[in-house]
């Protein structure tokens, strides 16, 4: 690559955690950016540039990637106060019946602002969730979500698909019936409108609910027909395929249904069987680990065993609700302690592997490893700068250890995506944060009131003065309601 006489942007850093093939950590280096690409990475006397960011203590790393989250959840944070069955009912009632396009846009604007502040430059966001409610009755929800993504300047891969059996599904205040074929047609149209994550920063993936052997006993032929249809659409449009809520035996079934390939990424994936491991190895599908999710309390995703079996594993937040956000630093630390505690061994899941799981490994899982996920000349300039001159990030040694064990979303100082500085010293000039917050609260208050769940936004007195609350009925994602 020819280096121009003057670069567009120069980042001078105390440390650069490159995640390149050699996993270099460069001390006292610089990154030169030309247009939307990294032009050069080096040490010594820096080249000239039209814009320079040079402050003491900055640690550069690739923009963080969140491989599994949910649109809608940002406006229903903490609803139900730990009652899992109520939580699913709230999601069903709001996402399917009460949510307007304005709701989806307000939630996406809030989520993107939170991600930007946390250094998450790319995210997979399911267009719904809870009890497998995918808002694909029309393109309106997806269009609203995509518009907010473009406004933010970040990259989002929006996962869309049909809901769970039985059909028709019902949507809107009038409970309009929508068939499987109609939802599939909307997904196809959303791909046409928005699938350009590298150029327009909004992409589209396909999703199908997770089914189990129990479901096959009653609905096997229909599940096979739907699986064949979603795989045919994926192959025709070249999208990523993802699923939410795998557990023991369901991955092997998904492989039997023809859903798995190197372009498949499966979330949660707890209590896996030997047949599940075999299916992953045969298909090349990847796993998205969600260490902070409730499913990771009810079961364990065997991340170290998967990695040792040659299976790619990346990280997802499963955010922004009911009890977790988009801070990938927190999810990295959670993953480290989760698996080390299980094995009672501090050598399990080294720091660098945790960072790989939300950078280069996640980029490869999404089919973007040649473009993002590391700091290398020629790649897209998706870079974040962490302010290392903080008491909890000092002394200035062992940058990877400091990032994975001690850093937090609030330490992200600067965010660059496609070579554009979106946040500088935590200022985001192109977004009106106060307006985003006000709109989000107004839309949340409206849908909770309209759905009859306004009372679910209050905390229970059971949180005080006792070792445990009364057990709430929790039904994990992927089970039949």
Image (spheres, rainbow, N blue to C red):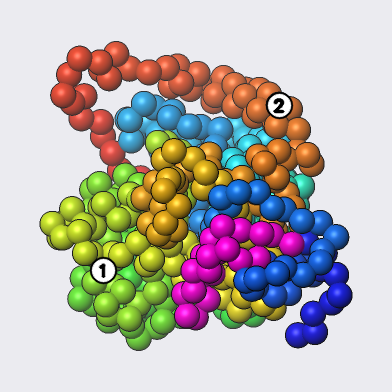
> What's drawn in magenta, residue-wise?
10-30
Q: Where's residue 291, x and y in %? A: 33, 52
Give the residue pinned by disc 2: 434
Q: Is residue 3 visible?
A: yes
Give the residue pinned by disc 1: 304
The foreground one among 55 and 131 is 55
Numbered label tally: 2
Q: How far apart are marks 1 and 2 (CA)?
A: 42 Å
Q: Where's residue 134, x and y in %? A: 55, 50
Q: Against 479, is 181 above or below?
A: below
Q: Against 42, is 458 above or below?
A: above
- Residue placed at 49% from the left, 80% from the top? 21
Disc 1 on helix, strand or loop? helix
Q: Where's residue 231, x and y in %? A: 53, 76
Pointer 1 and pointer 2: residues touching (CB < 8 Å)?
no
Q: Does the magenta stretch include residue 171?
A: no
- Residue placed at 81% from the left, 66% from the top? 48
Q: Against 372, is 454 above or below?
A: above
- The quadrant of the image that shows the C terminus is top left
Q: Main secondary structure of the magenta part?
A: strand
Q: Against 392, is 415 above or below?
A: below
């Amino acid at each position: 690559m020819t280096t121009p006489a003057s670069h567009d942007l120069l980042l001078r850093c105390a440390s650069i955690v490159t995640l390149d093939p050699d996993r270099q950590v460069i001390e006292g280096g610089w990154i030169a950016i030309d247009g939307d690409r990294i032009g050069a990475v080096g040490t010594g006397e820096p080249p000239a540039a039209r814009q320079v960011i040079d402050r003491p203590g900055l640690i550069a790393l690739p923009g963080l990637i969140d491989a599994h989250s949910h649109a809608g959840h940002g406006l229903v944070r903490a609803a139900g106060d730990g009652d899992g069955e109520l939580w699913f009912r709230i999601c069903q009632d709001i996402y399917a019946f009460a949510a307007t396009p304005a709701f989806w846009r307000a939630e996406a604007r809030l989520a993107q602002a939170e991600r930007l502040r946390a250094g998450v430059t790319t995210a997979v966001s399911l267009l719904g969730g809870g009890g497998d409610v995918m808002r694909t009755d029309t393109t309106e929800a997806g269009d609203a979500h995509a518009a907010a993504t473009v406004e933010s300047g970040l990259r989002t891969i929006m996962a869309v698909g049909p809901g769970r059996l039985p059909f028709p599904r019902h949507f809107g205040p009038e409970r309009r019936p929508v068939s499987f074929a109609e939802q599939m047609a909307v997904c196809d149209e959303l791909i046409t409108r928005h699938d350009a994550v590298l150029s327009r920063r909004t992409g589209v993936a396909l999703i199908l609910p997770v089914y189990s052997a129990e479901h096959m006993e009653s609905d096997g032929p229909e599940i096979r027909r739907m699986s064949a249809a979603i795989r045919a659409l994926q192959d025709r449009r070249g999208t990523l395929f993802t699923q939410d809520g795998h557990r023991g035996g369901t991955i092997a079934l998904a492989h039997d249904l023809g859903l798995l390939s190197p372009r498949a990424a499966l979330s949660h994936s707890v209590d896996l069987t030997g047949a599940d491991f075999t299916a992953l190895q045969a298909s090349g599908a990847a796993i998205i680990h969600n260490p902070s999710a409730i499913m990771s309390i009810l079961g364990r995703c065997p991340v170290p065993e998967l990695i040792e079996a040659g299976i790619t594993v990346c990280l997802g937040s499963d955010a922004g609700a009911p009890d977790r956000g988009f801070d990938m630093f927190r999810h990295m630390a959670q993953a480290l302690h989760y698996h080390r505690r299980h094995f009672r061994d501090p050598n399990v899941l080294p720091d660098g592997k945790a960072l790989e799981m939300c950078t280069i490994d996640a980029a490869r899982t999404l089919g973007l490893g040649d473009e993002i996920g590391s700091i290398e000349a020629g790649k897209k300039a998706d870079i974040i700068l962490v302010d290392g001159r903080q008491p909890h990030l000092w002394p200035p040694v062992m940058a990877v250890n400091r990032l994975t064990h001690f850093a937090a979303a609030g330490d992200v100082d600067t965010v660059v995506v496609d070579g554009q500085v979106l946040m500088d010293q935590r200022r985001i000039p192109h977004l009106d944060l106060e307006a985003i917050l006000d709109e989000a609260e107004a839309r949340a208050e409206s849908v909770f009131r309209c759905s009859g769940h306004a009372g679910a936004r209050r905390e229970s007195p059971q949180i005080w003065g006792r070792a445990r609350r009364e057990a709430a009925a929790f039904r994990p994602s992927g089970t039949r309601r």
